Image (cartoon, rainbow, N blue to C red):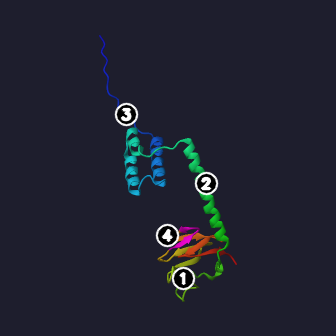
Amino acid sequence: MTSSFEFPTPPARLSDAERDKALKALRDGVALGRLSHDTFMRRMELALVAHHSHELAALTADLSTEGRVSRLVFGTVEAVSGFGVRLRRAWQAERLPKLLLPHPGTGHPLRIGRDPANGLRLSHETVSRVHAELVRQGGMWVLRDLGSTNGTTVNGRRVIGAAVVREGDQIGFGQMSFRLAAH
């Protein structure tokens, strides 16, 4: 007489692909405004420690998946919107005043700000007294924010600490913007 024993089998463990898919759904959810930052962070933590697919499903259940038509429409709108932004930036970039890079042989940083002692004085209320400096280091130009109130930007991105800049880059000090040019 043979008897069979059935043992309950635990659910299969998650694969990296399943976890990546859930993390992408969470990132898309926050990007589309369906999740707050705090909710996103908490769900991401839970996704990273999840052991089974039903745990991931619970984290992404309220994030509706779009059909093929919705993705096509949203993708088209995103492409057109992005084109307008790029066109506007290009139009404004050509109209920016040029800021000539200092001669590389000087070896001294160019200080920029409202203070009359700066090498480049910008008298605008959004520019700090000592706003930033431009210096040649190792064959590259480096733009360093000096703790300004309204920030320093390179090509629309805020500089945290320092950033390498090149001829043609758009740089901003507060609300004043320039296009870098060589001699």
User: Mark 3 falls on what kind of element?
Assistant: loop
Q: Amino acid at mark 3?
A: Pro
Q: Is residue 112 above or below residue 163?
A: below
Residue tagged 1: 124
Residue 127 in the image, given as x and y percentages of width and height: 52, 80
Looking at marks 2 and 4 on the same chain, the residue that comes earlier in the sequence is marked by 2
Say whether marks 3 and 2 touch (CB < 8 Å). no
Residue tagged 2: 79
In the rendered image, which quarter contains the N terminus?
top left
Relative depth, front residue between 111 and 128: 128
What is the CA distance from the residue labelled 1 to the residue labelled 2?
A: 36 Å
- Please give the label number shown on residue 50: none
Q: Amino acid at mark 1?
A: His
Residue tagged 3: 11
- Please give the label number shown on residue 160: 4
What is the CA distance from the residue labelled 3 to the residue labelled 4?
A: 46 Å
Count of marks overlaid on the render: 4
Looking at marks 3 and 2 on the same chain, the residue that comes earlier in the sequence is marked by 3
